C-alpha cells in the first residue's frame, strides 16, 4: 500500500446534498487509485460509501436545512477504513431491519438494501454517536480478492 | 452511465455501460418507463459493460419488474459479472429475475 499522497487531502467535507454524493465518490475514487487499491476493491468501497451518503443526504438533516458530511480515509498495512460523519439527528442505520431477501417480486420493497449491502461487502462496520455527530466507520481489506 | 436501446426478436434490449448509481439510476428508470409507455412489454437489460450498481439501481430494476408484471411483461437480465452479479446476489434479486449468461441465451429462452 502506498502512503497517502501529501498533496491530496484524506479528509473530504461537503454539504449534504445529492450533488455532493457524486463529488465525494469521484474524490474517493481518485484517492483509492492513488493508494494503489485495486479497481475491483475500489468499486466495493465506493458502493458502501454511496449507500451511507445517500442515507445521510436523505435523512440526517431537516429538509432544506444546512448540514455537512465528512469522510476520513485511513489506510493501514492490509486494510482501509473510511469514517463517515454527519452532525444530524441521532441515527444508527445498522439498527434497521434487514431486507427480506427471500421474498417474491410482489412483496419485495426497495428499502433497507443499501445498508444491507454495506454490511455484506465490508469486513466490518460500526456506528457511534459521538457528541452531536453520527459516525460510521467501515473497513475493507486491501489484499487478496474477497471481502 | 450509457444506455443504448435496440430491438431484436421482438424484445427491447437496453445495453447499460458504466456505473448505475444514485446519480445515474434515474436515467435508466426513464429509459425503461419510456419503452413501457411506447408499448414494449419484453425488455432485456444487457449488463456486460456495467461495472457498478448500487441500491439506487436495484430499485429501478424492482420498480420496472413490478410495472411489467400486471402487463404480462418482464425484464430479463444478461451479461452480469463481478460486483454487479455480487450485488444482485447479496440482495436476493437473483431469484426475482430471469437471468442469463449472454444476450443470445436471454433472447432464445422461452417465457
Image (tube, coloured by chain):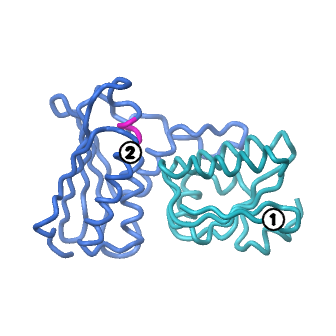
Chain colours: A blue, B cyan
In the rendered structure, the answer to whether residue A78 lies left or right of residue A49 reads left
Please rate how many residues cluster around mark 2, counting C-alpha atoms within 10 Å: few if below 14, some from 14 to 19, many from 20: few
Instruction: Give me the C-alpha separation between circle 1 and circle 2.
Output: 34 Å
A66 over A72 or under it: above or below: above
- Res B33 label: none
Q: Which residue is mark 1?
A: B7
- Residue B69 is drawn in which quadrant? top right
Residue A54 colored in magenta in the image: yes
Image quadrant holding the C terminus of chain B, namely bottom right
A123 over A54 or under it: above or below: below
In the rendered structure, the answer to whether residue B82 lies left or right of residue B45 reads left
In the rendered structure, the answer to whether residue B91 lies left or right of residue A38 reads right
Instruction: Please state which of residues B23 and A61 is positioned toward the viewer in this rendering.
Output: B23
The percent position of residue A134, horizontal first and vertical second, equals 25, 35
Q: Which residues are magenta?
A: A53-57
Please report, as a chain letter, where disc 2 is located. Answer: A
A42 over A133 or under it: above or below: below
Q: Main secondary structure of the magenta part?
A: helix
- Disc count in the image? 2
Report the residue that reaches farthest toward the left: A6
The residue lying at 42 percent from left, 56 percent from top is A47
Please report, as a chain letter, where disc 1 is located. Answer: B
Q: Describe the element under mark 1 as helix, strand or loop.
A: strand
The residue lying at 36 percent from left, 66 percent from top is A42
In the rendered structure, the answer to whether residue A71 lies left or right of residue B90 reads left
Instruction: Please state which of residues B31 and A53 is positioned toward the viewer in this rendering.
Output: B31
The residue lying at 31 percent from left, 52 percent from top is A24
Q: Which residue is mark 2?
A: A19
Amino acid at each position: 500500500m502506498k502512503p497517502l499522497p501529501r498533496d491530496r487531502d484524506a479528509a473530504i467535507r461537503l454539504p449534504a446534498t445529492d450533488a455532493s454524493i457524486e463529488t465525494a465518490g469521484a474524490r474517493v475514487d481518485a484517492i483509492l487509485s492513488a493508494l494503489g487499491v485495486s479497481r475491483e476493491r475500489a468499486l466495493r468501497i465506493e458502493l458502501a460509501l454511496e449507500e451511507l451518503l445517500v442515507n445521510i443526504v436523505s435523512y440526517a438533516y431537516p429538509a432544506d436545512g444546512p448540514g455537512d458530511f465528512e469522510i476520513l480515509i485511513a489506510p493501514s498495512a492490509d486494510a482501509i477504513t473510511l469514517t463517515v460523519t454527519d452532525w444530524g439527528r441521532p441515527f444508527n442505520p445498522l439498527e434497521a431491519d434487514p431486507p427480506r431477501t427471500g421474498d417474491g417480486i410482489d412483496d419485495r420493497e426497495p428499502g433497507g438494501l443499501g445498508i444491507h449491502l454495506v454490511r455484506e461487502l465490508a469486513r466490518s462496520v460500526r456506528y457511534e454517536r459521538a457528541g452531536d455527530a453520527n459516525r460510521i466507520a467501515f473497513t475493507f481489506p486491501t489484499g487478496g480478492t474477497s471481502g | 452511465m450509457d444506455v443504448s436501446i435496440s430491438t431484436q426478436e421482438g424484445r427491447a434490449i437496453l445495453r447499460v455501460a458504466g456505473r448505475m448509481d444514485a446519480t445515474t439510476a434515474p436515467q435508466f428508470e426513464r429509459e425503461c418507463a419510456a419503452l413501457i409507455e411506447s408499448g414494449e412489454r419484453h425488455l432485456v437489460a444487457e449488463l456486460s459493460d456495467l461495472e457498478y450498481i448500487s441500491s439506487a439501481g436495484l430499485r429501478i430494476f424492482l420498480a420496472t419488474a413490478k410495472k411489467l408484471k400486471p402487463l404480462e411483461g418482464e425484464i430479463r437480465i444478461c451479461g452480469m459479472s463481478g460486483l454487479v452479479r455480487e450485488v444482485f446476489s447479496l440482495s436476493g434479486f437473483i431469484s426475482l429475475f430471469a437471468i442469463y449468461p449472454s444476450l443470445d441465451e436471454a433472447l432464445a429462452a422461452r417465457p
